Structures are given as C-alpha cells and as structure tokens.
Image (cartoon, rainbow, N blue to C red):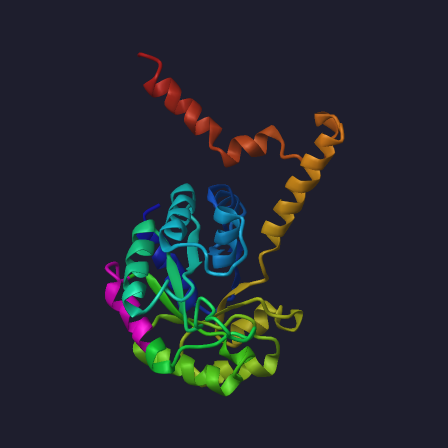
Amino acid sequence: MQSTEKRTRLRKILAGQRCVTAGSVWDPISARIADKLGVEVGLMGGSLASFAVLGAPDVILLTLTEFADQARRACRASDVALLVDADHGYGNALNVMRTAEELETAGVAGLTIEDTKLPREHGSSSAAQFISIDEGVGKMKAALAARRDPTLVILGRTSAAQVNGVDDAIARLKAYEAAGVDALMVPGIKTRDELDRIAAAVKLPLVTGGSGEALADPAYLANRKVRVWSPGHQAFNAAVKAVHDTMKAAQEGVPASKLPNVAAKELMDWVTRAADYDGYAKRFLSGA
C-alpha cells in the first residue's frame, strides 16, 4: 500500500466520529502483527524507538536519522497507518523541517511535534519545561511548510496540562490549531475534567494516550473529539519479559519443547512472509 493511502486512512479516522485504539509499533515484526490483528493506527513512540534501536531510556539520545530509519522499516513491512512521535523535532524550527521531510520520505502516515524543551538543560528541575508558545507555533508552521504530500498528517502536541495546568495547555493547543496543524495530541491526561475542558476549547480532533483508566472508555473519548487513543506500550514490555524468561529458562536447561509461549511455526512463517519468499525463490531462482 502506498504511503498516501495510509495517510488518507488516518485522515478519515480523524475526520470520523469513532475513537480507535492504537497499537504499539517499534519494528517490522510488531508492525506486521498490528496489521494482522486489524489495528487501524500504529503508534511508534520515541521511547519505543529508543528502546528498540539503542536499548536506552527515552532521554533524547536517539537521532533523527536513527528514528526515521526505524520508522521506514516498520512502514515498509506493513500496511498499518503509522503515527510517530517526533518529539521536539530534534532541534529548532529548521530542524523540525528536516524531521518532517525525513519522516514523510520514510512513509509515516502522521507525526507529532511537541513543545517540551528537550533535551533537558543543565541544572533544570525534574519536571518538564516548555518552549514559548511563539516558538511552538514556529515549529508547527515549519513542519507544515516542509510537507510535500498534503495528506501527511501533522499534529501539534503538548504535555503542559500535567505541569503548567490545563489553562496553559489550552492556550498552546489553540495557538497550534490556529497555525494550521491537522490534529492535536494531549498525552497523559489524568481526569475527565481535564479532557472535557480541552475538548470544549478546541475544534480539531484529538489523540491521547498514557491516561488513567478513568478515561479508558471509547464512547466517552469519541464524544470528546478523541479519534485515536493509546492504552500504553504494554506490548513492548510483554515482549521484553518473554525474551528474558525464555532465555533464562533455556540457560537453566529447560528443553526447547518445554519452553512456554513460543510462537508456533505458522505464526513465525506469517510474520516473516515465508510463503511469499518461497514463491519468489521458485519464480526467480529456479532457472526456469
């Protein structure tokens, strides 16, 4: 499926009335599994990419090139519409332009640009800090200006509600809305009152995630303009535990036939497209 088709599908979801649950994607296999399960929107968080590529926490060590390459691998392997967390755009507004260009080329359906001041400055507190609204607007406009495919979805993102309060978050979101972004991402909203206020203040569709269970109601979220919701990245955490436990059991002498929760050959063949490659070999390597 072409990138434009995936982007058009994401736009239809954002323009609709439903709230869909995003699936965590961090590499080609997870992207293909999401596709197999009928996941409509894949979400590649910056944290997941840092885990998968560097084995490091989400402290802005990953480079744009590394992130774009990982997104490209996932997009190439699957038809799922991939929404990616492009953090702060890897620098100022000019860096944001480069970020949008690289991620569009990688094939993502949409990308978020946030207004958190990253990486953390020397002597800063543990709480997140934010760039000015004016600088945030400049970043949103830069991302939009760099876009070549008009179907690519650009989302303005802020976590200010959890640090500066809902009023500041609303001011930022309304400014990014006026700048022309396609949708808004508000991660970490904890209460219905917070989401109610934000939804009432903006016109654009919302994407949220990392929220408490009080918000885990698709009907409620849909009624508050939320079109994509992420319940978290538990799939990655579960994968880490599975690798750890299986490797530990093997080291302790558990026979391969007794290892629990090992993917059957049929599933492995599916996620690796073994039948397709067998067909290619017969078609192109047989000498016929």
Residue at coordinates 30% horizontally, 75% vertically from top-left? 138
Residue 187 lies, with reference to residue 68, above or below; the image says: below
Does residue 243 appear to the left or right of 61 in the view shown?
Answer: right
Q: Pinpoint residue 182: horizontal percent, then vertical percent.
A: 35, 70
Which of 148 and 241 lies nearest the eye of the viewer? 241
Q: Quadrant of residue 14?
A: bottom left
Residue at coordinates 35% horizontally, 65% vertically from top-left? 91
Q: Pinpoint residue 223: horizontal percent, then vertical percent.
A: 53, 76
Which of 239 and 126 lies nearest the eye of the viewer? 126
Q: Is residue 277 visible?
A: yes
Quadrant of the image containing the N terminus: top left
Q: Main secondary structure of the magenta part?
A: helix
Residue 211 lies, with reference to residue 66, above or below; the image says: below
Which of 202 and 158 lies nearest the eye of the viewer? 158
Q: Pinpoint residue 202: horizontal percent, then vertical percent.
A: 43, 82
Q: Is residue 45 visible?
A: no
Quadrant of the image containing the C terminus: top left
> What span is in magenta?
137-150
Farthest residue to the front: give it.
Answer: 123
Residue at coordinates 44% horizontally, 54% vertically from top-left? 62
Residue 101 lies, with reference to residue 187, above or below; the image says: above
